[in-house]
């Protein structure tokens, strides 16, 4: 009899706990892009952590010192066995920032500040802290870690004020254009984003002279920058193909991965 | 009599809260009132705000790109803060937040709201006074290790003086340090490169700050004391 009661008691306790857990959904970060995974707050807390002091530098120059507890990003990514070229961090409020993976050796996913859990106001429950970067990049309420590389994105770099790393979904943000042109002797219709729009977004430098397009297999074509920039009919399709109306087919680069302004 | 006075006061107060003029600078300068702005088409931008709960805020206003044409749009606030945003980014001149006038403490009655995937919230300029359409050919930019990438038209050399000075285009020169401070250089920056029509020229940033030369617009942006002509950009590294 006693045993049954104890059994039921334990069972109800266990059930109770499970029930509670379901009620309060756990905070989880999605890892997307080159791999797909999830990292819950509990997973994160179970990992080897570091405790350190860091100084947050605001854009106004104000400095704020706090102690933090968190896990190195590189340790989080270890189990996926992946080395991205770039990482985009996305916060709950839609704020995003993209950084080169090489600049993230001191990036931590933190869950405690000054010995306490990080409140939502302070950017919790999980906040990105990059000890050697300005506070502007310490994303609050981190929700998604998007891993980017040549496998899934186009990189626009070189003489640009901003390096752009765009996945196929990112291209949806831009206004599309449709053109009809001759390709290999046939009239065809293509839909894509004007390269001009992408170069404007990357903010090309004033002394840009050349532009180089490179495909995933290393095939490269090069043009005068002004020639490409002034032609709004040159498009990139959603499957990363370069549409070059009036040019020979060898210039229509397929599987485009890199646009470099020189 | 007392009643009269209070009605009169009420009028003044109401008048003050509604009265907000701003300027659109394209080829010329045009002044608009808030009520004139409200006659244009309305566009909406949603903002996700994380407070105690996560909620959506609806901003309504006029899309800025229907007011003019340019490569870049500069937005200048009453207290002379400036941001430069590419023309094709969705930006609205917002006068309504969740259906009501934008409150003063949030930058009302007129501020800008920017599409969510474009950069930092610091672009959401408050108390908007000037919208200026910039032709990249006739401006210089400052970028690199700065927090605020900016484009300066000849007229924007007045942004260190007053809104009126910008509108009247009174000055054609300013000390370089003021431009560097407007762009907010990062503390690790060490090098400054001037990109001119003749090529690039590098200097030590600290040395240049000590000299603090004057940049002058005279059919091109020049720094006479450094022998630099037709400056197209300043890169900080």
Image (tube, coloured by chain):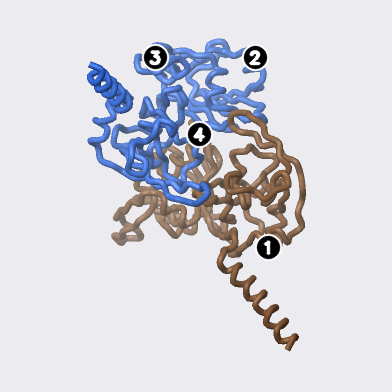
Chain colours: A brown, B blue
Residue B79 in the figure: left or right of residue B202: left
Residue that mark 3 sits on: B165
The quadrant where residue B137 appears: top left
Q: Nearer the viewer, residue A76 or A165?
A: A76
Q: Secondary structure at mark 4?
A: loop
The CA span between labels 2 and 4 is 27 Å
Q: Secondary structure at mark 3?
A: helix
Q: Nearer the viewer, mark 1 or mark 3?
A: 1
Q: Secondary structure at mark 1?
A: helix
Residue at 51 percent of width and 31 percent of height? B149
- Identify the chain of the residue marked 2, using the numbered disc in the image: B
The quadrant where residue B7 appears: top left
Q: Earlier in the sequence, mark 1 or mark 4?
A: 1
Residue that mark 2 sits on: B210
Mark 1 and mark 3, same subunit?
A: no
Q: Secondary structure at mark 2?
A: helix
The CA span between labels 2 and 1 is 52 Å
């Amino acid at each position: 009899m006693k045993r049954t009661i104890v059994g039921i008691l334990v069972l109800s306790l266990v059930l109770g706990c499970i029930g509670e857990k379901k009620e309060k959904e756990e905070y989880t970060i999605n890892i997307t892009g080159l791999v797909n995974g999830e990292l819950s707050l509990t997973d994160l807390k179970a990992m080897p952590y570091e405790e350190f002091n860091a100084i947050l530098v605001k854009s106004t120059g104000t400095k704020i010192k706090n102690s933090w507890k968190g896990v190195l990003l590189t340790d989080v990514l270890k189990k996926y066995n992946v080395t991205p070229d770039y990482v985009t961090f996305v916060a709950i409020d839609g704020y995003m920032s993209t950084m080169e993976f090489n600049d993230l050796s001191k990036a931590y996913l933190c869950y405690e500040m000054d010995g306490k859990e990080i409140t939502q106001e302070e950017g919790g429950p999980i906040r990105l802290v990059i000890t050697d970067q300005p506070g502007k990049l310490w994303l609050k309420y981190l929700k998604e870690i998007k891993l980017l590389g040549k496998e899934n994105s186009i990189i626009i770099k070189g003489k640009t004020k901003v390096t752009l790393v765009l996945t196929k979904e990112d291209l949806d943000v831009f206004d599309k254009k449709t053109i009809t042109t001759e390709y290999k002797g046939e009239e065809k219709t293509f839909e894509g984003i004007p390269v001009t729009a992408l170069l404007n977004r990357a903010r090309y430098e004033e002394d840009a002279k050349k532009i180089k397009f490179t495909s995933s297999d290393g095939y490269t074509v090069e043009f005068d920058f002004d020639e490409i920039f002034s032609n709004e009919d040159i498009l990139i399709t959603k499957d990363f193909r370069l549409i070059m109306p009036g040019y020979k087919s060898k210039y229509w680069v397929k599987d485009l991965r890199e646009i470099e302004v020189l | 009599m007392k009643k009269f006075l209070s009605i009169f006061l009420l009028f003044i107060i109401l008048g003050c809260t509604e009265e907000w003029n701003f300027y659109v600078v394209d080829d010329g300068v045009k002044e608009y009132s808030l009520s004139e702005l409200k006659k244009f088409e309305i566009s909406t931008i949603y903002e996700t705000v994380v407070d105690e709960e996560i909620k959506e805020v609806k901003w309504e206003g006029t899309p800025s790109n229907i007011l003019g044409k340019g490569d870049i749009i500069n937005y200048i606030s009453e207290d002379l803060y400036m941001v430069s945003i590419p023309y094709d980014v969705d930006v609205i001149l917002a006068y309504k937040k969740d259906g009501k006038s934008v409150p003063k403490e949030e930058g009302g009655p007129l501020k800008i709201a920017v599409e969510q995937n474009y950069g930092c919230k610091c672009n959401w300029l408050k108390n908007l006074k000037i919208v200026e359409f910039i032709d990249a050919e006739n401006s210089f930019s400052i970028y690199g290790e700065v927090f605020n990438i900016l484009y300066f038209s000849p007229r924007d050399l007045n942004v260190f003086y007053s809104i009126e000075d910008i509108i009247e285009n009174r000055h054609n020169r300013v000390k370089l340090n003021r431009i560097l401070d407007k762009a907010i250089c990062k503390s690790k920056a060490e090098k400054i490169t001037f990109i001119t029509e003749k090529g690039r020229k590098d200097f030590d940033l600290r040395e240049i700050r000590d000299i603090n030369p004057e940049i002058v617009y005279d059919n091109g942006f020049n720094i006479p004391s450094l022998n630099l002509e037709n400056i197209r950009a300043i890169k900080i590294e």
